[in-house]
């Protein structure tokens, strides 16, 4: 048994936010309450001054496994997640080969069993992510896919997507969508506007995103399917989500820490490290994303953790791949850029990073109450630290290196076991 005492315990779903003790037994949360008995505990963690919250849930990571273990594999990805306070992550399917067949998925599911945290999988929506033929969605659900997605690529054929939504509604599995229409995308990873002009690249317009957000929310509305609009980046997309939700569409909007923390100016400073799809846009877009988080137009925060090698990122604007790692900085970026400026309360931030995605994907995660799995994060919301250039991830492509942030993960517990401690801490 483990006793965590004197921490500020936050469980957004029940509104709990108070200093109390938490007792863990046999992989579950046994009890919450003040001055719990220490007798029989093999471990007592003094969490005074720290927040004790449900383990974070990331609905969108890329672990490059199978295919590119030099960037990340499921073991290093899980270690990076644990260091960031995550106890559940959902892997995208754009691996090599892609997760478009039950055999690929089954092998990943088996390997995931040995990992210290819950590493879940999506499968592709279409065979080879080619957008031409639907994958065997039923078989992939049976093999353990928690969602279907061609993330990294948009689904261009509206009729195919409509059929996919009808199937996914029957199966009760959501479809997650990367919204950038290649027909309107002149070049990827850099917002089309003032900065793309300065850099001499064609750029990715907000319109390329918005036309697909509008189309796919309408398809969801008309089919009754549940969909995720992945990494929303433009102000108009936020407004579309707001409208479509009001009309009754089952649409879940996600935003990344890089999109709510940065604006396009970062490209001048950090170069291709800030190249990401969809791109980081204007300050106005950034503030609209935050307003979306505040009023519920945006439901959750995901990292889109996308490891790439140093060599690849050094290839220049046209050739460098898009994406950045994010698991080890996500919580601190939320605290620094959402909570400290007063946009969200700590409990609201925790909600967006735990119970909101868990509910949408139907996961038993994101709660801190008696009977729930003993998956927790302990963090110091005040600790100031500078992002270094070494990570638990196998890659280090982060534009946040060198920045000073608030909020430090002190310990991560999954299934009652410590899966990360920050070394200096009490956890
Ligand atoms: O920037 C991105 N990189 N966006 C995506 O959607 C895919 C990801 C990747 O796989 O590298
Ligand atoms: Zn992604």
Image (cartoon, rainbow, N blue to C red):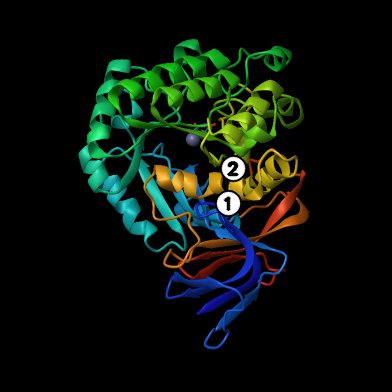
Which secondary structure, mark 1?
loop
Q: Is residue 395 visible?
A: no
- Is 358 placed above or below 368 here? above
Query: Cα distance, mark 2 to mark 1?
Result: 8 Å
Q: Which residue is mark 1?
A: 393
Q: Which mark is residue 275?
A: none
Question: Badge 1: how crowded within 10 Å, few (<14), some, or many (20+)?
Answer: many
Rendered view: 335 above or below 269:
below
Does the beta carbon of the residue at mark 2 sit less than 8 Å from ligand 1?
Answer: no
Residue 371 at what x, y percent from top left? Answer: 42, 67
Residue 408 visible at all: yes
Left or right: 173 with respect to 80? left
x%, y% of residue 69?
48, 48
Disc 2 vs disc 1: Cβ atoms closer than 8 Å?
Answer: yes
Quadrant where the C terminus sits is bottom right
Whether the residue carrying mark 1 lies under 8 Å from ligand 1 is answered with no
* Residue at screen point 47% across, 66% down: 374
Determine whether 273 is above or below 64 in the image: above
- Residue located 61% across and 12% down the image: 202
Task: Please identify the quarter of the rendering in which residue 229 is found.
Answer: top left
Residue 3, given in percent of the width and then of the height, sits at 57, 76
Q: Nearer the viewer, residue 326 or 67?
A: 326
Query: Toward the viewer: 20 or 2?
Result: 20
Between residue 168 and residue 12, name the one nearer to us.
12
Could you tell me residue 158's position as x and y percent?
32, 16
Circle number at residue 325: 2
* Residue positioned 26% across, 42% down in the render: 140
Judged left or right of residue 264, residue 249 is: left
Secondary structure at badge 2 equals loop
Q: How many marks?
A: 2
């Amino acid at each position: 048994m483990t006793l965590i005492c004197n921490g500020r315990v936050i469980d957004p779903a029940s509104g709990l936010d108070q200093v109390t003790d938490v007792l863990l037994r046999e992989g579950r949360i046994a009890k919450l309450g003040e001055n719990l008995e220490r007798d029989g505990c093999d471990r007592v963690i003094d969490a005074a001054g720290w927040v004790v919250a449900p383990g974070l849930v990331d609905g969108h990571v890329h672990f490059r496994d199978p295919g590119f273990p030099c960037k990340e594999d499921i073991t290093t990805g899980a270690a990076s997640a644990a260091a960031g306070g995550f106890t559940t992550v959902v892997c995208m399917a754009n691996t090599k080969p892609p997760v478009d067949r039950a055999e690929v998925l089954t092998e990943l599911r088996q390997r995931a069993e040995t990992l210290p945290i819950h590493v879940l999988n999506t499968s592709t929506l279409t065979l080879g992510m080619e957008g031409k033929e639907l994958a065997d969605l039923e078989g992939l659900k049976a093999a353990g896919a928690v969602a279907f997605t061609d993330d990294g690529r948009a689904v261009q054929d509206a009729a195919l997507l409509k059929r996919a939504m009808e199937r996914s509604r029957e199966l009760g599995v959501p479809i997650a969508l990367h919204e950038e229409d290649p027909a309107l995308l002149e070049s990827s990873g850099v917002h089309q506007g003032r900065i793309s002009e300065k850099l001499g690249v064609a750029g990715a317009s907000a319109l390329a995103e918005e036309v697909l957000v509008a189309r796919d929310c309408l398809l969801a509305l008309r089919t009754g399917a549940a969909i995720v609009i992945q990494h929303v980046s433009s102000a108009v997309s936020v407004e579309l989500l707001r409208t479509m939700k009001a009309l009754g569409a089952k649409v879940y909007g996600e935003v990344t820490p890089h999109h709510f923390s940065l604006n396009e100016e970062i490209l001048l400073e950090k170069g291709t490290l800030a190249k990401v799809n969809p791109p980081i846009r204007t300050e106005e877009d950034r503030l609209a994303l935050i307003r979306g988080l505040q009023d519920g137009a945006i439901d959750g925060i995901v990292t889109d953790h996308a490891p790439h090698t140093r060599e690849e990122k050094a290839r220049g604007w046209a050739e460098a791949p898009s994406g950045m790692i994010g698991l080890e900085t996500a919580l601190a970026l939320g605290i620094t850029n959402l909570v400290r400026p007063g946009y969200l309360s700590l409990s609201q931030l925790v909600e967006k990073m735990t119970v909101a995605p868990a509910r949408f994907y139907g996961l038993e995660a994101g709660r801190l109450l008696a009977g729930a799995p003993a998956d927790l994060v302990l963090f110091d919301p005040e600790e100031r630290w500078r992002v270094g250039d070494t990570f638990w991830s196998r890659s280090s492509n982060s534009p946040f290196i060198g920045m000073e942030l608030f909020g430090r993960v002190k310990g991560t517990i999954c299934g009652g076991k410590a899966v990360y401690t920050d070394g200096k801490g009490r956890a």
